[in-house]
Amino acid sequence: MHPHPAPEALVRDHTVYACVMGSRAFGLATGGSDTDRRGVFLAPTPLFWRFEKPPTHVEGPAEEQFSWELERFCTLALRANPNILECLHSPHVEYADDTGRELLALREAFLSRQAHETFARYALGQRRKLEADVRIHGAPRWKHAMHLLRLLMSCRDLLRTGTLTIDVGDEREGLLAVKRGEVPWPDVESRMNSLATEAGDASDRSPLPEEPDRRRVEDFLVRTRRTSACQPDPYDEVVQGVVHGRGIRQP
């Protein structure tokens, strides 16, 4: 039996969706901004039949690149993980095959009022780090403060409208002023408090459902896995023989 493919090969050969994230997706890029790339790969189903499973995520192979295996990505999205939901709503999609386009068509199935809890919990953790910086160094890391404000705005607007928009639009200049340290920390803190309150109020009246559509997402995942199981396996002739022989009947 052939060894498992290198993680980088899974990303290279089996990516179904790729996008640009970070400041370039948020509308906050400046001259020195990096290009952060995120993606989703579909590990061939036969690889899951072994004791050693495919990785749930892969860093690289390029700099500033990170990818999730499809099942892990869907699991995190159903939990309303902010980074994952934003990845699905990037305005800069670089690649999507048929599976990737179906994943994008499922974006609304992942959205629910659970986003309030998960975004708020993530924001609280980031806020505590900023407050620690202020106590120890006299000032926060201003770039992180800017991104926390952006996240709180995104959460509030998602709960108000039922739509996740990650480009900051008209808020760009005000947020970049925070990044440059031009806004006093007490003012930034006050803005964070207001946004958190507004998000809480919006959650009570949100058009979003209480829970994500887990069944619809799982149906997509099962169909995708089944289709993959019936494809020639580029990594293992032995497993490929099982798929196309007596082990699994062809549809």
Image (cartoon, rainbow, N blue to C red):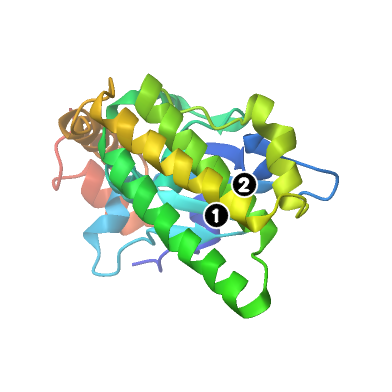
**Lower position in the chain sequence, tag 1 or tag 2:** 2
**Horizontally, is 200 left or right of 128 in the view?**
left
Q: CA distance from mark 1 to mark 2?
A: 7 Å
Residue depicted at 46% across the width and 47% down the height: 193
**Quarter of the image where one finds residue 116:** top left
Q: Quadrant of the C terminus?
A: top left
Q: Which residue matches tag 1?
A: 66
Residue depicted at 42% across the width and 33% down the height: 156
- Residue 28 seen: yes
Furthest-right residue in this view: 31
The amino acid sitting under disc 1 is Phe
Q: Nearer the viewer, residue 47 or 147?
A: 147
- Tag 2: Cα neighbours inside 10 Å, few (<14), some, or many (≥20)? many
Q: Which residue matches tag 2?
A: 37
- Residue 16 seen: no
The image position of residue 196, as x and y in percent, is 41, 43
The image position of residue 55, as x and y in percent, is 39, 62
Residue 28 lies, with reference to residue 179, above or below; the image says: above
Q: Nearer the viewer, residue 58 or 198?
A: 198
**Horizontally, is 187 left or right of 239 in the view?**
right
Q: Secondary structure at mark 1?
A: strand
